[in-house]
Image (cartoon, rainbow, N blue to C red):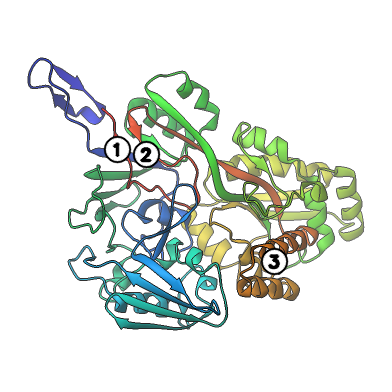
Amino acid sequence: MIHHLRRGVAIWALCAGSALAQQTDISIGMVLEPPNLDPTSGAAAAIDEVVYANVFEGLTRFGPDGAILPALAESWTVSEDGATYTFTLRAGVTFHDGSAMTAEDVVFTLDRARAEGSTNAQPGLFANIVSVDAPDDLTVVVTLDGPDGAFPFDMAWGDAVIVAPESAETNATNPVGTGPFRFANWAQGDRVDLVRNDAYWGDPVALEAVTFRFITDPNAAFAAMMAGDVDAFPNFPATETLAQFEADPRFSVIVGSTEGETILAMNNGAGPLDDIRIRQAITHAINRQDIIDGAMFGYGTPIGTHFAPHHPDYVDLTGQSAFDPDTARALLAEAAPGGLTLRLALPPPAYARRGGEIIAAQLREVGIETEITNMEWADWLERVFRGRDFDLTIISHTEPMDIGIYAREDYYFQYARPEFVALNDELARTTAPEARSALLAEMQQMIAADYVNGYLFQLAKTGVANASIEGLWENSPTQANDLTGVRWTQ
């Protein structure tokens, strides 16, 4: 008997009563193609979605529940003053090119990330490092400028994965890591292929081959899933079709939460948005629930600051920027009596394109016109994120616990209020949980009171997969498609 499966693959049962061979390859759908494949030199979430935990690993890593787990470091200790971390590395780890991973590679990675001129997108993760030393091949000693209870958390980010000096400069197009999958091919505009790393130091993975396919259009994503051209779409863009998948026994629908604060980002460093009255007017013109319903078909949790609602330290500040068009009009009459037209730059994700049209209509109701530009991802990164050439944009910040970006002077929305920077610095030096919670609450309240951005909703994780697949993450504690525990059940 022949069973015809996706892409025309046939699996034979050799005799009556024999079981079909278990499938060992998988095709994963993604909305955005990464601009490169080096998580240590790029800000795009799509990079980590391909390589985090699959190709590259750090000293620590995020588990599916957000816990910080050992990775290349099997353990670590902290000095009494909280300022020195000693990591014990796993023995026998090799990079995909066969070279040994040692403490010297960790020293190279951390020194490179914190060096002047570093292209790392998250320099704050390394800013408090004073020195990194390697007493022997399996020991790394990191000395900080003060106590930092969050340092193992920081080292779990994709931006902190360990790379080798021999391959660091070419990781963007030919990534060489230590993970359970090796890079095989990148057909730009179409897919990235990975294969199993049979020399992996850890537990072997079930999958032998992985293909990440890039499908931006929601209708095309729906068609690809229905046709079996992709086996799973962990961040499915066509949420309006989820009911169809739920009713079809061939599929499972996986709904969870993400770290993605979806915001209407504003350029605080240039007029007219350097005027808090205009930023406040914009926030009061926005009806969050209309955006969640219209752009996300009801999936999403309203937020009033840059913090995940599922985090225990979240402060609900949605009332401070509640939908109030009359207040918005009054503020605009005072701040911009001659009217206002703003540029609205929209990257490819459906939440941005659909949400942008809704927000443009809401702003028009209070007297703000918008000039919408739909941008490809690479152009958005260059012009908006790096070039800061924008007025408004819509983006989900999917990095975990990333409120510290508001302390960065070079960050694209250009806030960095000195009092906020001081709070962020104090947070880095604070280890007591109660004191950290108080600081985080004050930081949330400050950026909400300054109306730095329009805080819209926490991005839901809505995934669709073949019902025979297990092990995909339900929630997204970081921006990743971790396939280390994924397998076919039949």
Q: Residue at x 92, y 51 (%)?
A: 330
Could you tell me residue 466's position as x and y percent? 36, 29
Q: Nearer the viewer, mark 3 or mark 1?
A: 3
Q: Are marks 1 and 2 in contact (CB under 8 Å)?
A: yes
Identify whether 21 is placed above or below 360. Answer: above
Q: Residues within 10 Å of mark 2 (few under 14, many from 20)?
A: few
Front residue of 161 and 438: 438
Query: Given this view, does label 3 or label 2 mark the residue nearer the observer?
Result: 3
Q: Amino acid at mark 2?
A: Gly
User: Which x, y percent locates residue 127?
Assistant: 53, 77
Pick whichever, 139 or 169, lies toward us: 139
Give the residue number, with chain letter if any, for mark 1.
487
* Residue at mark 2: 471
| Marking on residue 424 | none
Q: Is residue 284 visible?
A: no
Gap in Å between the C-alphas at discs 1 and 2?
7 Å
The C terminus, quarter of image: top left
Residue at horizontal 27 percent and vertical 64 percent from the top: 176
Left-right relation of 70 to 431:
left
Name the quadrant containing residue 417. Answer: bottom right
Give SS at disc 2.
Answer: loop
Point out residue 365 in the picture as x, y percentages from the top left corner: 81, 41
Type of amino acid under label 1 = Arg
Looking at the figure, which quarter contains the N terminus?
top left
Above or below, 29 against 427 in this view is above
Q: Amino acid at mark 3?
A: Ala
**Quarter assignment of residue 440:** bottom right
Mark 3 touches mark 2? (CB < 8 Å) = no
Q: Earlier in the sequence, mark 1 or mark 2?
A: 2
Residue name at image x 17 percent, y 53 percent = 198
Give the camera-side residue of 476 and 145.
145
